[in-house]
Image (cartoon, helix red, strand yellow):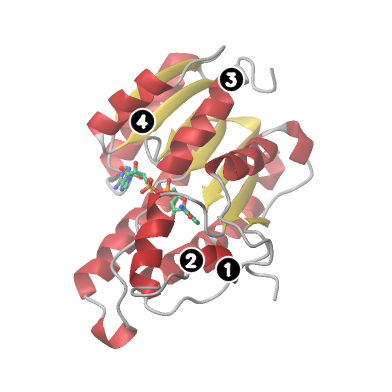
Amino acid sequence: MLFSGKNIIVTGASGDLGTAIIKRLICQGANVLAVDSDDAGLSHLVAEVSGAGVLEIFVADVSNGEEVLSYATRAFALWGPVDGFVNNAGIQTPVRSIVEFPEEDFDRVMAVNVRGVFLGMKHVLPRMRDGGSVVNMSSALGVVGGAGIVAYVASKHAIIGMTKTAALEQGPRGIRVNAAAPGPIACRMTFKLADEVFAGSNKSFAETVPLRRHGTPEDVAGLVSYLLSDDSSYATGTTHAVDGGFTTG
Ligand SMILES: NC(=O)c1ccc[n+]([C@@H]2O[C@H](COP(=O)([O-])OP(=O)(O)OC[C@H]3O[C@@H](n4cnc5c(N)ncnc54)[C@H](O)[C@@H]3O)[C@@H](O)[C@H]2O)c1
């Protein structure tokens, strides 16, 4: 039981990756506060997850400071200091070149992906146990560019900058802050993007990576589990790819 008695917050909890991460953590004995703006999705999650750990849910918009403070406070009230924080909620938009990219889409992505990750750290870190671990969900597109998705690419690069900054600030407390950078994972977000990028052809992102397959949500959950656990106890401020080699060439 890798996470027995550990208190862990996961945002974007009812999405494809959040669900896989939470299943892994609950199997390993964690107390998980699952945060998402999608009330129905959280109810679905409760029905789907079982294991040795304890699952609590909390409806909140990660881009709203008061709601972020509320979920951080709730986690502390439930189980005391937080041991792990998976800052995972994120959104993508329709594909458009920069000159055609709607301002409101840019602002919406920045609000959730950048402000949400910042606010999460702002309110969870003071409630975290010394020696805890934060995993911020960036992307392979936080390391390389991507035509047509300027806001997403900018937001995921920003998460890596915030991760490095938080690692510098929190190091003296023994709190580690790392970024996970998934490539194309077999789930809704990837398939929706592929529908636009490869429209009218039979191509998929699987052909664009050296390993010639999509990743699975479980591949990402494995990396997150590693970064939350003591197995990664000397890693901080880093970005860990789980992308089948997408960013290698
Ligand atoms: N799926 C991939 O291939 C992939 C690759 C790289 C990075 N990522 C990143 O991983 C994270 C999870 O992706 P996913 O594939 O599970 O996506 P998803 O769309 O399945 O899940 C995202 C979840 O975030 C929630 N959410 C959105 N806005 C929110 C807000 N304002 N407040 C609270 N919750 C909100 C949604 O309700 C949803 O449950 C995202 O940050 C995404 O950018 C995904």
What residue did someone put label 3 on?
27
Closest to the camera, between mark 2 and mark 4, is 2
Classed neighbour count for the residue bearing mark 3: other residues with Cα under 10 Å, few (<14), some (14–19), many (≥20): some
Q: Looking at the image, is mark 2 or mark 4 earlier in the sequence?
A: 4
Return the mark for residue 71: 4
Q: Nearer the viewer, residue 177 or 180?
A: 180
For numbered disc 2, what is the local secondary structure?
A: loop
Which residue has dot 1 on it?
A: 207
Q: Which of the 4 quarters of the picture holds residue 140?
A: bottom right
The CA distance from mark 2 to mark 3 is: 32 Å
Q: Position of residue 214 (x, y in %)?
A: 56, 55
Some atom of ligand 1 lies within 8 Å of the CB belonging to the residue at label 3: no
Q: Is residue 124 visible?
A: yes
Quadrant location of the N terminus in the rendered image: top right
Comes first in the chain, label 2 or label 3 = 3
The foreground one among 60 and 218 is 218
SS state under label 4: helix
Q: Nearer the viewer, mark 1 or mark 4?
A: 1
For the residue pair 126 and 96, the one nearer the viewer reads as: 96
Label drawn at residue 204: 2
